Image (tube, helix red, strand yellow):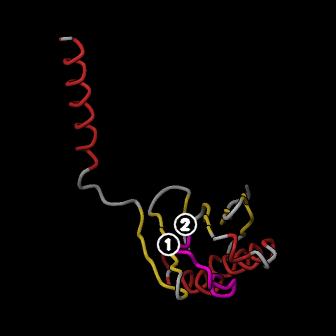
Amino acid sequence: MKYIILTMVLFLFVSCKNNDEEIGRPDPYILTERDISEDCGAFQMRFKHGDCILNFALSGPCEQLKTEEYINEYSEYLQKYQDSLLVKKGFILLQYHRHNFADTNIKNLQDSIINITKKSFKTNVSLKESGKGYFEINVGNDK
């Protein structure tokens, strides 16, 4: 019983010590959010380090969101933050609600996003990965 208590105290001490190092550290990203339709917001996590440049996602039910609104919001975001994104290479993760794009050919959505990104970054952009409700694009990489 003594060893169990000693082990638990030691474990808690080590766990608390590890968490102390995280306190006060700045977030590795800049978070922004905007309402893009009556029931939908877009949030963007622009990363400061690493291979991920941007996570562009939706919040809310987004039942009234149109494909054009999603594309326009992405385009406006890149235009607004073009200077801080221009020198980055890596990937961008784009997330969406599948029900919003049920009538849309996802390949057309991806092509639109890739073309907008190419114009904004002035570099090669390609599809990296695609799945249910998301896709990733490479920016400035030949991978």
Q: Is residue 22 magenta?
A: no
Measuring from the top left, give residue 64's x and y in whole percent. Answer: 62, 85
| Label 1 packing within 10 angstroms: few (<14), some (14-19), many (20+) | many
Amino acid at circle 2:
Asn
Q: Are marks 2 and 1 in contact (CB under 8 Å)?
A: yes
Q: Is residue 66 magenta?
A: yes
Q: In the structure shown, which secondary structural element does the residue marked by tag 1 occupy?
A: strand
Measuring from the top left, give residue 33's x and y in whole percent. Answer: 45, 78
Q: Is residue 122 left or right of residue 86?
A: right
Q: Is residue 110 left or right of residue 3?
A: right
| Label 2 packing within 10 angstroms: few (<14), some (14-19), many (20+) | some
Front residue of 34/29: it is 34
Amino acid at circle 1:
Gln
Measuring from the top left, give residue 139's x and y in whole percent. Answer: 65, 66
Front residue of 28/82: it is 28
Instruction: Determine which residue is flagged by label 2.
Output: 55
Q: Residue at x 24, y 15 (%)?
A: 4
Measuring from the top left, give residue 28's x and y in whole percent. Answer: 40, 59
Instruction: Determine which residue is flagged by label 1.
Output: 44
Q: Which residues are drawn in magenta?
A: 54-70
Q: Residue at x 78, y 78 (%)?
A: 104
Query: Which of disc 1 and disc 2 is earlier in sequence?
Result: 1
Please identify the quadrant where the C terminus is shown.
bottom right
* In this view, 50 is above or below 41: above
Q: In the structure shown, which secondary structural element does the residue marked by tag 2 occupy?
A: strand
Q: Residue at x 23, y 55 (%)?
A: 24
